[in-house]
Amino acid sequence: MGCLKRGRSAHVRTWMLAPLVGIVMAMGTSSPALADPAGSIWTIPTQPGPVQSVHGFAITYEKQNQDAAPLGANDFGCVPSEDHPRPVVLVHGTDSSAYSDYAALSPQLADAGFCVFALNFGRDPAKTTYGTEDLRTSAAQLGQFVELVLDSTGAPNIDIVGYSQGATVARYFINKLGGADVVNRWVGIASPSHGGNFYGLGSAAAAIPGAVDMLTPVLTPAVVQQIQGSEFLADLNSGGDTVPGVDYVTIGSRIDEMIQPVAGIALSGPNTTNLFIQDLCPVNFTGHFQLPYDPFTLALVITALDPAAAQTPSCVPVAPGTGIPEVIAASH
């Protein structure tokens, strides 16, 4: 059963969340944590952080500034323009946050005239990192946030950009929770659309009865649900990868460090476009971790959101492994 319907009258739960908008709009005020009945926490970051060009640097900054918001995001006074009538909602990845994944894209979208919004979702109350909890719960949290965005901006629908886990969470919201009624376009960056085998470890675990369940305490629920062959992905993709009324664009790398086989990134169905960086720019070897900070990739995202203003992105060499050392350093 869908949780959202196209049109203003359907946002019946928004009155429960309306006070949060007032808090977020107050200058210099940190947003409160909202606890889902399942125990998972989501928040709206409010403190604009600096623009970043390297994923690892953004992760380091966010660890020291946990209410950091990507520059240009979460201005609840933003009024969509005629050229960009749909707000853009950014959905982060695993063990991550809105700032750490979108400190490059958000300011570019804001500069281009989009109203941009981003939440932090799926946090265990006992931990500080987001994107670790049950993906169905996270998708419902995204739905609550989308209601706030629609009511704040007065827009009838939105576009969504998801990175890694965020692409899957957004697609579950669209395909299974009624989000198709309010989403015009879904853009997935490094989307584990059909899961990954994590260099064979995921496939091996899936072949052993009970092994995936045993891994949950170690790998977090969100990681287990993204393993190729998981019950969650079977549910998400049952009946087809897409639903009518939404345009789907995937942007992936053929040398993705986390998603193998990389063919699992692509979606099948009507209104789908599947792009691989190396098919468009053979000298660009950007992988999973640096993809949301790769200028070529970001240009493709902006073009997907605004095809009328499409520009040919500059194709320059990018060495394999770019960005990985900084992510490793930031994570330890």
Image (cartoon, rainbow, N blue to C red):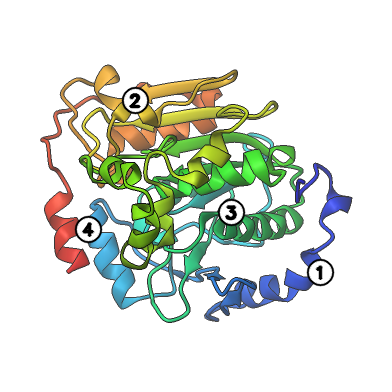
- Is 73 in front, or is 13? 13
Q: SS class of the residue under badge 2?
A: helix
> How many C-alpha atoms fall within 10 Å of the one at disc 2: few (<14), some, or many (≥20)?
some
Say which residue label 3 marks: 139
Of tags 2 and 1, which is closer to the observer?
2
Q: Identify the amino acid type marked 3.
A: Ala
Separation of disc 2 and disc 1 at Cα? 43 Å
Q: Position of residue 131 (x, y in %)?
A: 43, 61
Mark pair 2, 4: CA separation: 26 Å
**Circle 2 is placed at which residue position?**
263
Mark 4, Cα crowd under 10 Å, few <14 / some 14-19 / many 20+, is: many
Residue 265 badge: none
At label 2, the amino acid type is: Ala
Of residue 125 and residue 43, the one placed in the foreground of this image is 125
CA–CA distance between discs 1 and 4?
38 Å
Residue 15: numbered disc: 1
Give the CA distance from mark 4 to mark 3: 26 Å
- The reply to whether callout 1 and callout 4 are in contact (CB within 8 Å) is no
Residue located farthest toward the right when viewing the structure as drawn:
9
Q: Position of residue 314 (x, y in %)?
A: 27, 26
